[in-house]
Image (cartoon, helix red, strand yellow):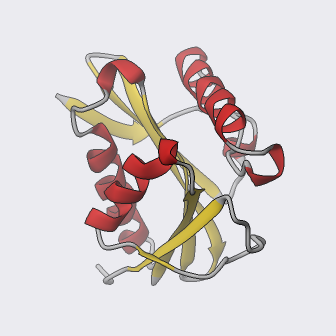
């Protein structure tokens, strides 16, 4: 059974998954267009970080960063390569959105890439109701970035 719980981004297996994530981001996008956070940045007090595990094995991770009252951003969504195709990203996204609603968020935003590598992520977010939007927070218009948002129904 897949369990999602808060976790420590510095935990060795999580650190490795996040390092792979960053390496893929820098291999796919120009450095100035990489907005992924490393494990130390994910420990900031404005961020809640979760992992998905099954029988202790790490399947994926995701985070929610509070930007302002009522507005949060999804960060560091990643599924371990061995767990792809099992619905881990969907489960994590549903968990993050439920937590955003519980916290009173009115809107959740995200940034992802425009390259073909990011097409599965864009499809996942669109399937869950996210739509493209202008840059938010500290982001600037970037031809390598797609910005998306979703209104959150209060819980």
Location of the C terminus (image quadrant): bottom left
Of residue 4 and residue 92, the one placed in the foreground of this image is 92
Q: Position of residue 44 (x, y in %)?
A: 72, 50
The answer to whether residue 148 is visible is: yes
Location of residue 131 with respect to 128 vertically, above or below: below
Location of residue 5 with respect to 114 vertically, above or below: above
The answer to whether residue 50 is visible is: no
The image quadrant of residue 73 is bottom right
Location of the N terminus (image quadrant): top left
| Image side of residue 1 versus residue 8, left or right | left
Residue at 53% over, 16% down: 13
Q: Position of residue 115 (x, y in %)?
A: 56, 50
Residue at 69% over, 34% down: 39
Q: Position of residue 127 (x, y in %)?
A: 26, 64
Residue at 31% over, 24% down: 83
Spot the residue most to the left.
1
The image quadrant of residue 38 is top right
| Image side of residue 74 versus residue 95, left or right | right
| Image side of residue 149 versus residue 8, left or right | left
Q: Position of residue 35 (x, y in %)?
A: 71, 51
């Amino acid at each position: 059974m897949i369990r999602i719980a808060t976790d420590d981004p510095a935990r060795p297996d999580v650190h490795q998954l996040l390092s792979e994530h960053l390496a893929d981001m820098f291999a796919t996008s120009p450095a100035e267009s990489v907005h992924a956070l490393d494990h130390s940045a994910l420990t900031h007090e404005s961020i809640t970080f979760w992992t998905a595990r099954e029988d202790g094995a790490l399947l994926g991770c995701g985070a929610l960063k509070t930007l302002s009252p009522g507005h949060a951003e999804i960060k560091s969504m990643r599924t371990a390569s061995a767990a792809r195709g099992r619905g881990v990203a969907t489960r994590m996204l549903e968990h993050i959105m439920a937590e955003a609603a519980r916290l009173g968020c009115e809107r959740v935003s995200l940034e992802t890439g425009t390259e073909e590598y990011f097409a599965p992520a864009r499809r996942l977010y669109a399937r869950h109701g996210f739509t493209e939007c202008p840059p938010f927070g500290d982001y600037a218009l970037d031809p390598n970035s797609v910005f998306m948002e979703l209104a959150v129904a209060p819980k």
